[in-house]
Image (cartoon, rainbow, N blue to C red):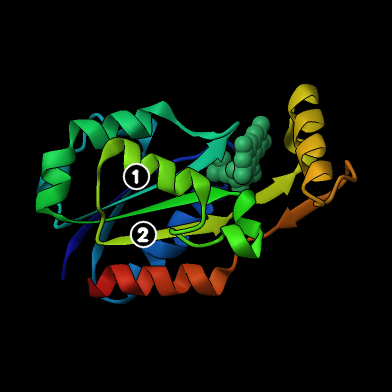
């Protein structure tokens, strides 16, 4: 049995949903899992865990800067432990942007923080226009228009391949 820490950053809850799935898979495989938002990390000592998983969504081209800070501050620890990272974004709904080698955000992030996690994944996220503020809704609709995605303001769509999340959850338990 391993102690696994999952640290996540989310804006609208989709990354948390993915983390919950990974948590439940890992627990079913006999591990003890703690799921912590990057905003609530203070009372947790990452050094106490066998494995550290970091998951973060993209907003306007970037992961939350607290995620970058967490990785940079804990780089030595992450290198010593077994670790994993995943990014959630809607560019990854495109077949030619949905792997760690082809997703621009993931590649840029890992290159910048100079971290080589044992497992890496990119998941297509979700869109729920009804949740967004006016300007965000307009911006995402424009991006979707340009990239041939859904633009209807009532659209609620989950692009995530949940089988892929399940595979990733199992891989984390097995690594
Ligand atoms: C305001 C806003 C900006 C976004 N910017 C990007 C972006 O630049 N690139 C991208 O691929 N996805 C972008 N997305 C899509 C999100 O990454 C996607 O909705 C994801 O599921 C959000 O996960 P979260 O709920 O965990 O934050 C954006 C979404 C919103 C609402």
Q: Relative to 136, is 141 on the left or the right? A: right
Question: For numbered disc 2, what is the local secondary structure?
Answer: strand
* Residue topped by disc 2: 120
Residue in the foreground of this view, choosing between 30 and 150: 150
In this rendered view, identify the residue nearer to me: 157 or 27.
157
Q: Residue at x 32, y 72 (%)?
A: 171
Quarter of the image for residue 71 reads top left
Split into 4 quadrants, where in the image is the C terminus? Answer: bottom left
Asked if the residue under mark 1 is in contact with the one under mark 2, i.e. CB atoms within 8 Å, the reply is yes
Tell me if residue 133 comes above or below residue 142 in the rendering.
Answer: above
Which part of the image, by quadrant, shows the N terminus?
Answer: bottom left
* Residue 12 position in % (x across, y down): 60, 39
Depth order, front residue of 62/131: 62
Q: Give how far apart the Cα atoms at labels 2 and 1 are.
A: 10 Å
Is any part of residue 102 visible from this angle? Answer: yes
Residue located at (74% from left, 32% from top): 132
Q: Indicate which disc, 2 or 1, sits on the residue closer to the N terminus.
A: 1
The response on whether ligand 1 sits within 8 Å of label 1 is no
Crowding near the residue tagged with mark 1, few <14, some 14–19, many ≥20 C-alpha atoms within 10 Å: some
> To which residue does mark 1 refer?
110
Identify which residue is drawn at 39% across, 40% down.
Answer: 109
Residue 79 on image: x %, y %: 14, 49
Q: Quadrant of ligand 1?
A: top right
| 60 to 80, vertically: above or below | above
């Amino acid at each position: 049995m391993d102690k696994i820490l999952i640290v996540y950053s989310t804006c609208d809850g989709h990354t948390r949903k993915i983390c919950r799935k990974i948590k439940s898979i890992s627990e079913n495989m006999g591990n003890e899992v703690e799921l912590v938002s990057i905003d609530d990390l203070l009372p947790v000592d990452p050094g106490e865990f066998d494995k550290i998983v970091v998951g973060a969504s993209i907003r306007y081209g970037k992961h939350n800067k607290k995620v970058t800070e967490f990785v940079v501050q804990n780089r030595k620890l992450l290198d010593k432990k077994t670790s994993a990272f995943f990014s959630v974004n809607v560019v990854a709904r495109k077949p030619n942007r949905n792997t760690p080698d082809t997703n621009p955000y993931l590649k840029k992030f890992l290159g910048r923080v100079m971290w080589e996690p044992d497992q890496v994944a990119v998941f297509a996220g979700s869109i729920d226009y009804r949740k967004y503020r006016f300007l965000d809704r307009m911006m995402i609709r424009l991006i979707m228009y340009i990239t041939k995605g859904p633009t209807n303001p009532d659209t609620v769509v989950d692009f995530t391949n949940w089988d892929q999340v399940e595979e990733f959850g199992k891989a984390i338990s097995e690594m």
